[in-house]
Amino acid sequence: MDTLGKTITCLAAIAWKKNSLSLEKVEVEPPKAGEVRIKMTSTGICGSDDHTIKGIISVKYPFIPGHEGAGIVESIGEGVSSVKPGDKVLTLAVPQCRECSACLHPKGNFCEKQDLLPSSGLMLDGTSRFTCKGEKIYHSFRTSTFTEYTVVPEISVVKIDAAAPMDKICIISCEVATGYGAAVHSAQVTPGSTCVVFGLGGIGSAVVMGCKDSGASRIIGVDINEEKFPRAKALGVTDFLNPSNLKKPVQEVVNEMTGTGVDFAFEAIGLTETMVAAWDSCNLSHGVCTIIGVSAPDLKLSLSAVEVFTGRTLKGTCLGDYKTRDCFPQLVTAYLQNKINIDPLITHQLPFDQLHKAFEVYHAGKTIRCVLLF
Ligand code: PAD
Ligand code: ZN
């Protein structure tokens, strides 16, 4: 069927309000200038999607969730030059415009054209490409991957190697870049170092993989769900802590176990109490605490002020600090060349129309990543 220039009616997930997700027939308009319409092939369920559906990350309702996506370009709008119909692509929750202060800074990656903080739910021209039952539907992160077709700005999409296996590769656009990248690129974990990872879900598991690949000698994994421990052990966790079973705060236990606190701590949950615990688990002089988890916008961290001057580093990271369009294709190539093995990070795959089942297994704490296939 020739879809070029036409509105496509297809299946999509819509969050009409907080905690309500339903599969609907939606109309997806053709891409405007500088935009790309993608036929999705796979998308992962990330903790951040759960945050948007629950309203922890503030978004506009009704919207189509999803950001960790892979697909094939169906059509392009006027002026688009970096991708063409038929290209395999990844969607980018943080774009790379290559013009703003973040993109021009050698280390910056939080492009000013991002739509997370704050979220407009609209394309760059201030309009939406989705409607359902006559109502305008908002985008999320300008990616909205829980749909058979989506429209994204050209700066939010990148072409990848044509040999990439589309049923797996979607997780490189968030889980792998974020978690693996937090260890190998943001914190730059050193050989022989000690690490603690708070949260052993999708992102935390990818952090563990990055710590292990960087040669960490001890990796302490912290999670309240012990079902996560066997897989985390296979990825490289050497010691486990379940804070619910401890008689003292988890950071005290980490400090006792390591003697002086860890060299590298990571928070991959999104709770202020675990962010503070990660910070307090770090070696006072040189420990590096990397916050990955996303919390609600009104929350504040409370840290002991006198313990800040001692030399520790507190750092946040978004998508592993990678410049997304420059670096994500390289991560895909690294996977194809067997330099990173992302396969153990995917524990479940389900057809897209079983989205509700996928969220059930996610909420039951059974998954590392569940990938939906179109
Ligand atoms: P997930 O739900 O797969 O994993 C969260 C894990 O935390 C689960 O294993 C839970 O059992 C565990 N957990 C929950 N509460 C506690 C607690 N009190 N103590 C210990 N463990 C606990 O989510 P995810 O791994 O996909 O995402 C994790 C966070 O990372 C989430 O906040 C998400 O928004 C954030 C994220 N950040 C970026 C970024 O670029 N910074 C990208 C993607 C996700
Ligand atoms: Zn994500």
Image (cartoon, grey):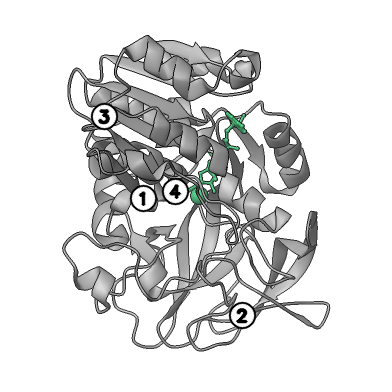
Neighbor class of circle 2 (other Cα within 10 Å; few <14, some 14-19, many 20+) is: many
Marks 3 and 1, how far apart at CA: 25 Å
Marks 4 and 1, how far apart at CA: 12 Å
- Residue at image point 26% right, 25% down: 213
SS at mark 1 in the image: loop
- Sequence-wise, the earlier of marks 3 and 1 is 1
Residue at mark 4:
174
Mark 1, ligand 1, within 8 Å: the answer is yes
User: Splitting the image into 4 quarters, where does residue 284 fall?
Assistant: top left
From the viewer's side, name the closer residue of 42 and 328. Answer: 328
Marks 1 and 2, how far apart at CA: 30 Å
Residue at mark 1:
317
Amino acid identity at mark 2: Arg
4 vs 3, front mark: 4
Neighbor class of circle 4 (other Cα within 10 Å; few <14, some 14-19, many 20+) is: many
- Sequence-wise, the earlier of marks 4 and 3 is 4
Residue at mark 3:
338
Neighbor class of circle 1 (other Cα within 10 Å; few <14, some 14-19, many 20+) is: many
Q: Is residue 254 left or right of residue 260?
A: right
Q: Is residue 236 visible?
A: no
Amino acid identity at mark 4: Cys
- Residue at image point 71% right, 32% down: 361
- Sequence-wise, the earlier of marks 4 and 2 is 2
Residue at mark 2:
129
Mark 4, ligand 2, within 8 Å: the answer is yes
- Residue at image point 34% right, 37% down: 180
Amino acid identity at mark 3: Asn
